[in-house]
Every structure is written in C-alpha cells, then in structure tokens.
Image: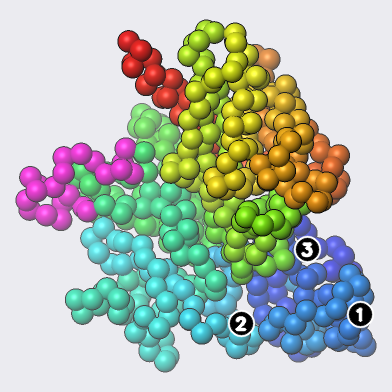
Amino acid sequence: MLENKLKNLSDRSGIYLFYNIKKKLIYVGKATSLRNRVRSYFRGVIPAKAGILQPNKISAYAGMTLVRRPIEQMIHEVVDIKTIQTDSVLEAIILEANTIKKIQPKYNVDLKDDKSWNYIVITDDKFPKVLTVREHELKLPTTPQPPFNKGGKKVRSLTPLGKGGRGGLLFGPYPGLKTKEMINLLRKLFYISTCIPRVETQNFASLPKKPCFYYQLGQCLGVCTGEISSAEYKKKVIKPLVQFLNGKKKSLLKNLEYDMKRASKNHEFEEAGRLRDQIKNLQKIQDIALLNKSFVESPVIARSLSDEAIPPKQGIATPRSSEARNDMRIEGYDISNLGSSGKVGSMVVFENSEPNKKEYRKFKIKTVVGQSDVDCLAEVIERRLKHNEWGIPQVILVDGGVPQVNRVCKILSHHPDPTATLGHPSSGRRGQTIPVVGIAKGPERKKNDFIYVRNPKISKLRNREIVKWINSNKDLLIRVRDEAHRFAIKYQRSLRKIII
C-alpha cells in the first residue's frame, strides 16, 4: 500500500502528512514537488511487515545508502502518507503552518530548530502593519487565553514593537520561512502599505508631497497621500490578507470576483481593473523567492537548471547548496537600433524574480556594420562572456525568435575560452548547458511565442524540466524581456541626446 503511494505521488507543490500505526499525524512538511520530496525520505529503507518501513543500508528505491536527516530517524513509524496539492509554494507554506498550528504533530514540535519558529503578525494600528517575528519575541501564555489566539485572532503583546507592546493578529508557525521574501510577496499580492499614513500626522507640510515609491508602481492604495481611509484599507487590504493566511483562497477569489463585477457595474473601472489584476496574480503566484533549505530534495528550478550547467570550477562561484540554488539569476538581453547606426544592447538581471539594477549592463555595438539584430546580439553575448566576475546565469533570455536563440546557443557551445563560457574545462560541457529562452512576438505581433531549442547535450528529463519551468513562469520571463527592452531604449535615447 505504502509502496504504491510512493509510486503515484504528484509532482506538484503541496504538503505531505505522515501517519503512524495509530493513525495519528506525526509529521507534516511542505514541498515544491511532493513526489521528489516524499520519496527522498525513503531512500535507504525497505518495506517490512504491516506496511511499516525499516532502515537498511540498501535502498529499495534508489540503490543509495541511508541519509539520516533528523526526521528520518522516525521514518520507521510511518505506515501511511497523505498529500494535499496546492497551486503555489506560498500556499504550501501557509497550509503547513495552519496544519502545525491545529494539530501540533509530534515530530514537527520535537525537531523544531533552536532559533524558534517564525510568525506573521498584523498589528492593530489604524493602518495595520504586517510584520514577522520569532516565537521567543512574543509574549505568549502557556495556554492560549483571550484575547490571545494562535489562529489569526488576537495576540496580547509583541516584545519587539516597544512602547509597552501592541496587540494584533498572529499567523503561523512557519518553519524555515524566508521572512523578507514572504513579506515582499504578500505586499505585492495584497497592496500592503509600508509608508507613513498621511492622516496620522497633523503637520501635512512636514510630509513629502511626492507619493511613496510603491504608490508610483501601483502597489500602494494611497495611504501616504490620504486617498484611502483606515476602514477602506482594512476592507481592501487586511481582510483579504487574513482570509488568504487562513488558507481560504477559493473563498477569497470568489469575494474578489464579486467585488470586481460590482465595481465595474458602478463604473469604478480603475478599482475593477485593480481587482482583476489581483485575481490574476493570486491565481498564478510567482513565489520562487520563497524557496530555501526547508525545501531540500524538491526540484527547485535553480537546481535543475544548474546541476549540469555549472560543474565546480576554480574562480567561479558554484551554486550547489540548497540555499545558493535559490539565488536564481536570469539574464535578459535586447538590442535597440535606429537604422544602421545608433545600435545598442542591454543586459538586465533578475534574481529571485526581482530586478537587480546594480547588475545591469549597457553595450554600445562596435563591430556590426549595417542592421542585423542577430549579429548585434552575438557581439553582446561575446563581450558578456569575458566577465566571469558578473556572476553565473541559470537562464539566458533574449528578445527574439529561433535565429537569436540558435546564435546564442552556438556562441555558448563554441566559445574558445572555457573560463568565459561558464563551464568546466575538463568536462567537455561548456556554457551550452545554460538554457537559452527566446520570446518572439508571433507572426501578427499580437502574442508572445516562447522559443526553447532542446539541447542534445543534456538529458531528456532535464529538457522536459526546463520546458515545464518555462510554461510555469511565462509572466516572469515577459517581465525580464520588457525590462531589457526598456533599459535598451533608455540607453539609446541617452546617447541620442548627447549626439544632439
């Protein structure tokens, strides 16, 4: 029975639940791939009587010796496994937290790290703030009593907030949470304000007239400008956030769709558009930045794209550890030209799904005569490959179709200097194992066609993983393409001003 479940596990993200012979939940964990993560626990164990798994030096599944992570010391107690699939890593994190909070599985509690669990707190300010704290920073009674509750209700006091402490809503625990990335993602999804509320000060003149940075990006509803009241903010931001953190995404989406239709009916088209975008973002959450060592053995894309692409090499940082693999670097390239002159190229860098503008580079085309985007791109790639110190991309994205992709692949595989191709001189595999993705605008220039030429130098499985990742991250890749285009245009315009 257990063997069949291991064979039929889904490759999707979610949580897995381990039960003992008494049908009691003893451990819950999260994974980007339930299949890979759960199977990893049973490498080095063989089936025994009554369906119980026992440790052995020979693996019944992978022919590997037993790897004893702390949880694997109790794996012999597991007689049943259940899984719950989620649409995203973020939802897996939240579902794991809610399950731990509700059931307190024995081994989740026993194997808790020394630094204590992380929690998310929503303060009870006029414009509530969303913070992360560790368990030891909370003043928690031994037995939950009103107004304290670990289920998103009331917590009496938070030590780190000072001034006698403040109450608020408490969510968690979140084992192994990347707190900064989590808050940043929630801020984007729910328009959480991080600015100073204009209505909280009597001296308006002392506040900057210019709205906050996130307001200009369309990610703040106007707390800084006084455009939204406390009641509206709680209704539009905090209420949906609380619903989401309580694991009620389906109900949340229904509510948002209802609000969107009502706003449209009332001719509030700007609000309807905001809700439409929010629904879309919640349906396809871009959350790779949340991946960390608590997802060990999961097929994180940074790992599947790096394992063969970047063998160990002196002088080149190799992202082999679970943490390093999550610092995923996507380099996007674009060419901008004004006729046969004024040709420039751009390189933008996204790390953990966000632009890292310090890593951007500009190229003034020097060798190409006439107008050829493919040749210009080739020059840019050649020049980039001379700079190992710029870092190692896990993905290269180009604005263009098959000709551009093929040209870049050819350069990566035939570059004469092994140290510049980001590969290993003795392996026979150079930079050509770095996936190259192109985005073409299609024959009618009304859609985005994603181009990936399968690489014969790598396994069929890895090629499939790359294609799967591309299909799951089209919005991110389009963002990289658009940013590369914007940066190239900006550089070209700055040069034209100088010439004028």
Residue 293, x across and y down, in percent = 61, 68
Q: Amino acid at mark 1?
A: Ile
Magenta highlight range: 196-216
Q: Earlier in the sequence, mark 2 or mark 1?
A: 1
The mark that comes first in sequence, 3 or 1, is 3
Q: Residues within 10 Å of mark 1 (few under 14, many from 20)?
A: some
Please give left or right for residue 83 compared with residue 446 in the image.
right
Where the C terminus falls, by quadrant? top left
At 54% across and 21% down in the image, what residue appears?
Answer: 365
Checking the image for residue 461, the label placed there is none
Q: Residue at x 44, y 72 (%)?
A: 119
* Residue 178 vertical position relative to residue 50 in the rendered view, above or below: above
* Residue 290, quarter of picture: bottom right
Write down the residue under mark 1: 58
Q: Amino acid at mark 2?
A: Asn
Q: Which residue is mark 3?
A: 35
Residue 416 image position (x, y, % from top left): 74, 36
Quarter of the view holding residue 398: top right
Residue 439 lies left or right of residue 78; in this view the side is left
Residue 108 image label = 2
Q: Is residue 326 left or right of residue 499?
A: right
